[in-house]
Amino acid sequence: MKLITHGTVSRLIMNSITDDYPFGFVDPESVALFELASKVAKSDVQVMITGPSGVGKEVLARVVHESSLRSNFPFVALNCAAIPENLVEDTLFGHEKGAFTGANQINKGFFEEAEGGTLFLDEIGEMPKNLQSKLLRVLQEKQIYRVGATKAIDVDVRIISATNINIKSAIKNKEFREDLYFRLGGFILNIKKLRDRPEDIEPLARIFIQKHTNGQHPKICRNAINILKGHTWPGNVRELENVILRAIIMSESEEILERDITFDELSDHEEDISLPTSLESETIKKEIFSFANVKKLPELKSNSELNEILNALKMHSTRDNAARELGISPRTLRQKLNDFRKAGLPVPSPYART
């Protein structure tokens, strides 16, 4: 069994080709989480990692993989929210030659690519419901069927999943299968927001400086560090890396100074989409309740649900945050907002986006 050291984790951060990076192991809670992940890795239990966007869920998954007996086999990652719904099954399970128009050869899916190793399913809460049942069957039977195949293929893969939504609320809302949750969530690891572990900010900043300068620009002044520690980091570790990258570009000396630290004007948002103001939300609310055709909206069952949705949108700066507050996925929230628009309600364009 390999012991994952802090140096190994730093290497994982610097070599990762993904957008997610982990915490520095200085904050006591981060250290405890690191130690727990190493213990969990010793078994073959399925792991679910929870936490907001940008905190480093994928690299924590890599830490579990690197600490396990499967470390000499592939680590394959798939963002379930980034793949069109009609391609998810093909991506996961592959297809046979002639399975559909254009299928001119056999194609292996991610399960086969990860054979013997780890398959990381990010944004598992966004997986289409019909694929959830197929994934459950794979976990139960340890076999897959390529698209167009009649013969099963045995697979030996550890699943690590991750989500930034309240998965239990998604189960309650019939958006996620409860039986699949119990299969995937053998052990839950939760990563906190960066602002809740401020001692991690400085070591992470130094790691990112090394990453983006090949070790040639290792210095950052104390005032600059203090500015970083005073920021709220709504974009978490991903935002921190962007700030450091900008500082490296702006720096005119061998040291990153206070003046080099700048924050995006939209740094209080996790998306480049600003939601309507509270005044606009109040206007929407008044107009919604004046419509007689509210009952035509298929997903909105009562005025109380309308109130809940609008209040969440009014209180939070992004749709992702509002969706988490409501216990639904961002995709479901977008659908509900589109239902408003289709029913003739005056939904401002940021709300109506798909």
Image: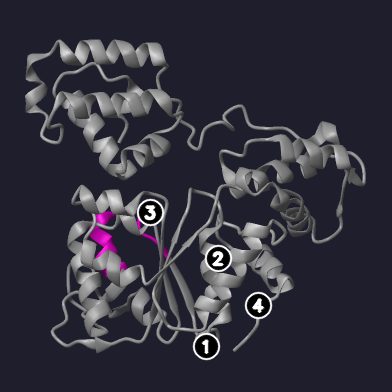
Amino acid tagged 1? Leu
Camera-nearest label, 1 or 3: 1
Q: CA distance from mark 4 to mark 3?
A: 30 Å
Q: Amino acid at mark 2?
A: Leu
- Judging by the rendered image, the residue that carries numbered circle 4 is 4
Circle 1 sits in a helix, a strand or a loop, which is it?
Answer: loop
Mark 3 vs mark 2: which is more N-terminal? 2
Q: Quadrant of residue 281?
A: top left
The reply to whether callout 2 and callout 4 are in contact (CB within 8 Å) is: no
Q: Amino acid at mark 4?
A: Ile
Looking at the rendered structure, the secondary structure element under dot 3 is loop
Mark 2 or 4, nearer chain start? 4
Q: Which residue position holds label 3? A: 82
Query: Would you place residue 38 above or below residue 259 in this image?
Result: below
Say what amino acid the circle numbered 3 marks. Ala
Spot occupied by residue 130 in the image (x, y as percentages of width and height):
17, 61
Task: From the viewer's perspective, tell me whether residue 67 is left or right of residue 299.
Answer: right
Stretch of the chain drawn in magenta: 78-91
Please report the residue visible at 58 percent of the width from the left and 80 percent of the height from the top.
Answer: 67
The quarter of the picture where the N terminus appears is bottom right
In this rendering, is residue 329 above or below 18?
above
How many residues crowd around disc 3 within 10 Å: few (fewer than 14), some, or many (20 or more)? few
Q: Secondary structure at mark 2?
A: helix
